Every structure is written in structure tokens, then in C-alpha cells.
Image: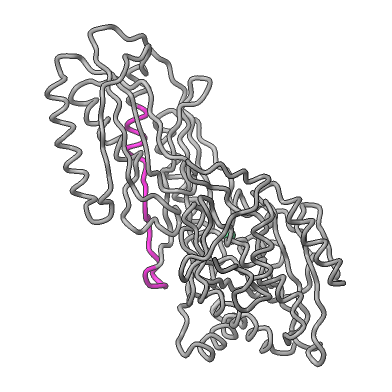
Amino acid sequence: MKDISSLEPKILWHYFADVIKIPRPSGKEEKIRQYLLNFAEKSGLETVTDKTGNVLIRKNATSGMEAVKPVVLQGHMDIVAEKNSESNHDFDNDPIRAYIDGEWITADGTTLGADDGIGMAAMLAVLSDEGLKHGPIECLFTIEEETGMIGAKRLEPGLFNGKTLINLDSEDEGELFIGCAGGIDTLATLSYKTKPVHNKFLAYKITIDGLKGGHSGDNIDKGLGNSNKILNRILWNAAKLYKIRISYFNGGNLRNAIPRKASAVFIIKKKYQNIFESYLNKISGEIKNELAATEPGLQINYEHAGLPKEVLTKSVQKQLLNAIYACPHGVVAMSQEMKDMVETSTNLASVKFIEGNRILITTSQRSSVDSSKQDIADQVASTFLLAKAKVEFTGSYPGWAPNPDSEIVKIVAGSYEKLFNKKPVVRSMHAGLECGLFLEKYPDLDMISVGPQIKGVHSPDEKLHIGSTQRFWKLLVDVLENMPEG
Ligand SMILES: [Zn+2]
């Protein structure tokens, strides 16, 4: 099989192959940091490691380009560590096993880490390629982007000098990102009491499966099903009609993923068995019909379960089912300025029974307008406050508002058009980037985010498009060569 390092341009793929070999899950960036420090030392480049563990590597301007505006290139060191259930990959120690599959590079049962390994590789290639023409370069490698943008959050003012920053952490070829949404998580905790179960009941388990799920920012406008909402709707109606009593409810996983699975166990009086099963078939058919276009794989299955020892008290069950029903999920507002762009959204991510007789409901909100982000978070909070839950906000980060006069956007768009004979799409993304946090410490930064085509980000299906990566490199080289003086 063809080796990744044999692809063109060799220098870029050489570093990509190197970087993905180094274990680097979020929070465990020591090995990749050491690799960067060794690289810089061997190359005779100036390096700064800040208190947080972010690394900055500087390269001087090439001869005759000393007066050109300095450019900061930026990407993150860590990757999302996701694997298939069959994979025995150890993200702390094993190299990612990547291979070429037609036009794509993908990994064997794990995330590939092209997010953001390709951004890192591009920076390393710029730093070591003696054939490029460019002004002063500063490459910033941040930590723990994927688990809360910790490196960007703790970045100190004055680490870098450049006033122009190119973020290399987006995933859509042909799209230049000039803004992003901010985010916040709203967590509700509901304490519960239980009562014992008698023998005149039957128990059922309902499972929701087969939904697409995906990133709660990028996919929130795709009309996908939410497993928690679907399950809750079935239970809410069953409670009203057949007085079912819930023993547990478990759905969703990551706060930034639309939930794909959920299940619940509950009891029902034996006399309702037949009528209940026909109700279930009817409502399942209705829900599948509503989602037929977007979720053809939806499965709603039920089976008999062992009788649980306890169920929720009536009042807690009511609070839970009403709150989840009332809690919004999906697109809240579209942008009136940018076509087809989601401005504000919310994701009802997970419902978990946790220790201490508590139910934890995790939701997350995004908006490109900071006040709207808090507004929707407060709306979600109010829903759960009505249900007597405790509510807290965590993980808030700011958005990055587009700057219509941005110089770097004009330069990159100009290069793109010149090289590829078509106009790039210039837009904001409905997801988080570290750029919003950089602005807090470096308010004068002029920024853009570009990247090659990556699909299935944050999942074992992650794959990087080879041709788009070659064009991404060409674009980056051209932009650096054509930066103005100043
Ligand atoms: Zn990333």
C-alpha cells in the first residue's frame, strides 16, 4: 500500500505522518509538546512554552521580506479520542494507524486526528521549508481545544506579536471562516425519591437507536431526531394514558453531540399490556413518519424487562417528563444577515441517572450573538427551575463576530480566487473556534480560519481529503508570500 509520506507535497505529508504517530488525547499533550520542542531545537528556531503548556515557535522572515506584516499561524495539539467498539486502540500509547483509501486518508477504527493534525503539519512544514517566501512567522500550538479550549482560555497577552492570525482548524474546503458562535452548557440536576414496586405490574424497556447524531453545532439545522426527546415523548404520553412509572431513563453522551441513543425502563399495570403495545406501535409509526426524510434508520424497540425494585415517585416523574418535553432543542434563530446561517441553537444532549439519587440533564447552547446565547441558556434554565431542579452554567466561551473590513479575509479570498478560478464561500461557523477567546487577550487581531476537507470529525469515520489538502497548502503558501508590508 502507498505510504502517506510519499504523497505530494512531501514536506507537508512527512509532518502529518509524524504528528499522527504521537499519542495526544486532550489533556495529555506532553509527548507532542516534546516533539515540537525537539523539532524547534533541531531547526534552530526560537520557542516559548507558556505556563499552560501552549507552544509558540518563531521563524524569521526570508530575505527581502523583513518588512512584511508578521503572521500568526495557529492550531491545536490535541485530538478527540474516539474508537469503534471493536478497536483495542490505546490512545495514551499507540500511534494512529492511518492509511490511504482512494482520495482520502482515514484511520483504522479510530479518529484520525487530522483535526487538527493537518493544521500542525502545515505549521511544521512552513517552519522547516527553506523554499518558501514569507515575512516573520509565529506558530501557536494550543492544548486541550477539544475539551473546553483550555489553552486558548488561559493564553496570556503578549505571547505573540503578530496582529494577523490564520487559524488552521476548520474542515470545509472552499469556505473561509470569518466568525464563529460562542457556547455555554446548562446543567440541571433533579433529586429524586423512589417507591417500591409490587407484583401486579409488568416492566418494559424501550430503546431508541439508529439516529445519525453528530456535531451539535454543524448538524443542528439538519432536522435530525433527538433520542432523548423521542423517548420522552413516548413516556410522557404513556404516563398520561396508562399511568406508567419510570425506573430509569438514560440517553445521549457528549454535550456537543446530538443524542443518538436512549433507553428507559418502566412499569405498567398488567391489564394495560395489550392496549399499551398497540399505543406504542402507533406512536412509533407517527414519529418515524415525521422523521422519514432525515432519519430513515430510526429504531424504536421495546421488550419485557425484569421488574425493577423501585420506581420514581409520581411527583418527580412528572417534573422530569414535563421538563424534558418543555425544554427546547434545535435551531432557535437563523441569521438575518448571513444566508443559511444558524445564529442561535440549543442541544438537549443527555439525561443520566447519577449517584446520590439524582438525574443530571446536560444541555448546550450556541449563538454568534453573546447576549442571545445567555438568553437561550436562561430559557432552558427556567424550564428546569420550574421542575424544581438545580441549574448551573458551565464552559462558557465567547463567539467571534465577523469583521467586514478584515484585511486578511480580502487577502485569502484574493489568493483563493487567483489560484482556483472561483470565489470561496465566506461565512461564519455555528460552532466554536479558539478565535473568540484570542480576541479577549488580543483585541486588535485580524483573523481568518481555513482548512482542507475533513469528514466525520470527532468520530472513527474521520477522513481527510488528499486533493483538498494539497490545495489548502498551496493557498497558505500563496497567502504568506503575498502578505503586504506594514
Ligand atoms: Zn479542531
For residue 217, above or below residue 280: below
Residue 156 lies, with reference to residue 206, above or below; the image says below
Q: Residue at x 65, y 52 (%)?
A: 95
Please report the residue visible at 28 percent of the width from the left and 51 percent of the height from the top: 295
- Magenta stretch: residue 322 in it? yes
Asked whether residue 365 is drawn in magenta, I would say: no
- State the residue lying farthest toward the top: 199
Query: What is the x, y in percent for residue 14?
Result: 67, 70
Q: Nearer the viewer, residue 290 or 241?
A: 290
The count of marks equals 0
Q: Position of residue 348 (x, y in %)?
A: 41, 43
| Ligand 1 found in image quarter | bottom right
Q: Quadrant of residue 262?
A: top left
Give how far across and how far down residue 353 sits, in percent: 46, 27
Picture layout, residue 99 above or below residue 352: below
On-image quarter of the N terminus: bottom right
Q: Furthest-front residue in view?
A: 1
Q: Which residues are magenta?
A: 319-340
Q: Residue at x 66, y 89 (%)?
A: 482
The structure residue drawn at horizontal position 61% and vertical position 66%, both measured from the top left corner, is 118
Nearer to us in this view, 396 or 68: 68
Question: Is 155 left, or right, of 194 in this rendering?
Answer: right
Camera-side residue: 136 or 397?
A: 136
* Scheme of image coloration: one colour
Classify residue 43 as left or right of residue 381.
right
Quadrant showing the C terminus? bottom right
Q: Position of residue 81 (x, y in %)?
A: 58, 48
